[in-house]
Amino acid sequence: MKAAVLENNKFVIMDIPKPILDEYGKGAIIKVIGCGLCGSDIVKMRTGKAKNGSVLGHEVIGEIVEIDSNTMFQAGDRVALGHHVPCFNCQYCWGQSYSMCRHFKETNIIPGGFAEYIYVSEEHLQNTVFNVNFGLSDIEASFLEPLACCIRAVKRANIRDNTKTLIIGLGSVGILMGQAVKAFGNEVYGCDLISERVLFSENYGFTKSYTTTDTAKALGEMYNAAPNGFDVVFLTAGASAAVNLSLKAVRDGGTVVVFSSITGDNAFKNNDIYYRELNILGSYSPSPMDLEDSMQLLEKNRVKVNGISEIYSINDINNALKDTTSNKIMKAYIKL
Ligand SMILES: [Zn+2]
Ligand SMILES: [Zn+2]
């Protein structure tokens, strides 16, 4: 089967063996229809976390073509899925840190979403695979997992009525985070260095977004909207300057949710946290419950995910990568 295999920071289209159901035991073989290219795929490539020869991609929409399972799924089902499954029975899971569960980290789809076929285990079918109804397009359904990540972050931030929320970084993740915040009944503000993205966000229900090329000016405008600062600030930008900006934008006693990796050594300082009574918390990857909530919001049309992704064929995946990293596009959807 055709797959985009990682080789020295690039994808190489190759013929690799198709996963065989009998080899792995219960589960299903899914013919991949498409798969979103995630920022985390790019980080894994750049940091060497993903080894040469591996197949990336996890934001999969596909069709079950072979199945051996005790679940209700059948061949022919169109499904979207999450790729990690927690054990629900360890110290991490008991504390609701599902994405820290060691079993969660070990489980995955085989070989990865940028391939014609993948194998998913019985555990995946039981917990992280969802039927997609007719109302949702393939691209919309491919947002199941990234939207679920944002839903987890919103839940962790404990947003209540009248919470003033700011999202720093208006790439595809920032836009999705805004959708999640709004779906939970709150207004949302945003900011980014790139003015096109600021404009783009206004089509997605952001009350107001600010361009931060001139930080002092942007902060002045933000304080008009939130005179004491924002209750919750989501950090989805990968630039280190965003850490300082988050500290200026958040109110005393407020919460900063760290939702992106940043290169270099950028610390939240002890005394900021102490004297200003700040909550700094991370949110990483979704639980099966977040995936379920994500599917509900998508199906009920409570979030807008249209118009975020550009479509590329698998043969063109290196251009998708280039256009994403150069900020020419917001996000790529790879069609198999
Ligand atoms: Zn992802
Ligand atoms: Zn566990």
Image: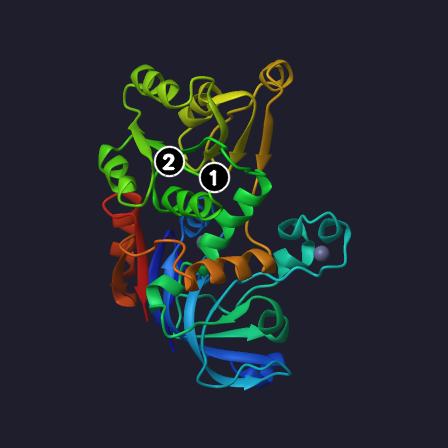
Q: Which amino acid does label 1 sit on?
A: Ser
Report the quarter where the C terminus lies.
Answer: bottom left
Type of amino acid under label 2: Gly
**Residue 205 percent coordinates (x, y):** 33, 43
Say whether residue 213 is left or right of residue 26.
left
State which quadrant residue 198 falls in.
top left
Residue 326 visible, this orientation = yes
Q: Which image quarter is the N terminus in? A: bottom left
**Marks 1 & 2, CB-CB < 8 Å contact:** yes
Can you identify the residue that label 2 sits on?
A: 169
Residue 284 in view: no
Residue where numbered disc 1 is placed: 260
Q: Which numbered disc, 1 or 2, marks the residue that appears first in the sequence?
A: 2
Tell which quarter ligand 2 is in.
bottom right
- Camera-side residue: 315 or 128? 128
Looking at the rendering, which quadrant does residue 35 occupy? bottom left
Whole-percent x and y of residue 252?
A: 55, 18
Tell me if residue 101 comes above or below residue 210 in the rendering.
Answer: below
> In terms of secondary structure, where does tag 2 sit?
loop
